[in-house]
Image (cartoon, rainbow, N blue to C red):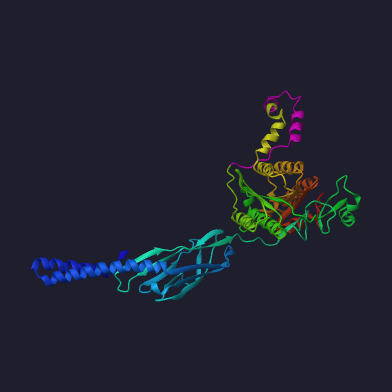
Amino acid sequence: MRFTRRFRAAAGACATLGGLAAVAREPVLLVGSLVLGAWLVGAAAAFVAGTRRAVEGLDIDISAAPATVRTDGETTVTVRASREPAAAGLQVTVDCQLPAVAELIDGDPTFAVTQGGGTDGTTVLLTAPVAGRFELGPCRLGVADPLGLFETTVPTEGSTELAVQPRRPRDVHVGEGGRRLAVAYGEHETGRGGAGLEPAELRQYIPGDPTSRIDWNATARLGEPYVREFEAQVDRETLLVIDHRATMGAGRTGETKLDYGRELALAVVDSADDLADPLGLVTVGDGGLTAQYDPSAADNHYRRVRTRLADLVPTDGSGGRSDPRGPGETREVAARLADDESAFADALAPLLSDSEAYVQRVRERPLLDAVGTALARRSRTELAVVVTDDTGRTELRETARLLRRQGVQTVFYLLPGALYGAGALTDLDDAYASYVAFEELRQELAGLGGVTAFEVAPADRLAAVLSAGRERPTAGVSHE
């Protein structure tokens, strides 16, 4: 409780009367001082009791519509205060606390509550330029007595959450070798192949595949055998792995690798939710595993996964990101240096003598280690969807082989570095050469049994790179 200037003036008058009564020995002045003092004490007690009744008799409700917006999107926040008649007698105002990052467009978050019972409120329009989850409220009650002697501020309970999601990237391309897929992730499109009814993925023919499953139209168009998988309409446990290391931050604001990858990840969540498939989530930063949710098909679980994906930001890559040689390359270098007697060869020999040491080094890499940890915890995982870029290519290969050894059908959504970054298209020839190298990696992964690999990119940038390369076709890249 705070004493106003008016109270201090009244208290001063009371003290003055008491002082004059003592000096002049006038009983009337003393009586006046006592009466005024008693009245001030009574008024203070009545204010405290009235404030308590005001707080107890007031119900605050805060809502936002919509409760989830994109950055710079607008939402309407409504605050309602329902008051009981017993709380009447004081001047009460309600001030709703808005997030510091919010920008008020229209309205006033503070309003007065009328005397007696009823409902009062306010509506404000605001926007938030920063992604995240923010609390609207709680509100504060400003209470003052009618005579202006006392005032106080009382916090109340009750708030609501506003989720601000990053802006969605424009025109997301998902495809293979520049060819856009009509549906990137459908109903069990990469589930167990077999005699399902709905066509799913198209992949390269692997020796041992039944000839009855060869798609002859695709084979004639692409110049090599392709097999059409079909959906198996059963519940399928899916592991979603999304990389948010520092390299995933490349790109323009709202159109980074992570922004595009998040769109694909959310599509996976939506599909699993629609089909009631158990879904697990693993998020990977530069320091390793950042979150892991065990598979579940509960409604609140899908909401938790979506919230986690919306909150992802690139981690700090201060340690850098290298790509160690594969075991085959290591053995090849060691063989070439076997007969070399130079000091340089002697220095390298201990590093190349044990190619298995390479495997241990790779297993310490964040993506590979996170996937291995997740698989060790679960035995039913049937599909893994991995969203990452092409920076650590050896790690990608080892991750694909690990999943394949575990019998897990795998889909890679790869974000080619050649198509992101502020200066990615400064030199279209260089960008095209980088894209060709990426496409070779994508085809290599897609050629592994049980593995499918798609490119995810801004459609306009991909079109510009492919257009620049049409005059010099490169093997392995189609411009259809």
Residue 38 located left or right of residue 442? left
Looking at the image, which is closer to me, 368 or 300?
300
Looking at the image, is 114 positioned above or below residue 141? below
Check the image and name the residue furthest to the top: 341
Q: Where does the image place residue 332, in percent across and percent down from the top left? A: 77, 32
For residue 97: magenta? Answer: no
Looking at the image, which is closer to me, 80 or 421?
80
Q: Where does the image place residue 378, in percent across and percent down from the top left? A: 69, 45
Instruction: Tell me what residue is drawn at x 74 percent, y 35 percent.
Output: 327
Residue 253 located left or right of residue 475? left
Q: Quadrant of residue 342?
A: top right
Q: Quadrant of residue 113?
A: bottom left
Looking at the image, is 347 positioned above or below residue 97? above
Q: How many marks?
A: 0
Which residues are the magenta region?
A: 319-348
Check the image and name the residue furthest to the front: 86
For residue 343: magenta? Answer: yes
| Quadrant including the C terminus | bottom right
| Quadrant including the N terminus | bottom left
Looking at the image, which is closer to me, 389 or 368?
368
Instruction: Tell me what residue is drawn at x 49 percent, y 62 percent.
Output: 99
Q: Where does the image place residue 62, in percent across and percent down from the top left? A: 50, 67
Residue 315 in view:
yes
Q: Where does the image place residue 66, in percent across and percent down from the top left? A: 58, 67
Residue 422 in view:
no
Looking at the image, is 339 positioned above or below residue 168? above
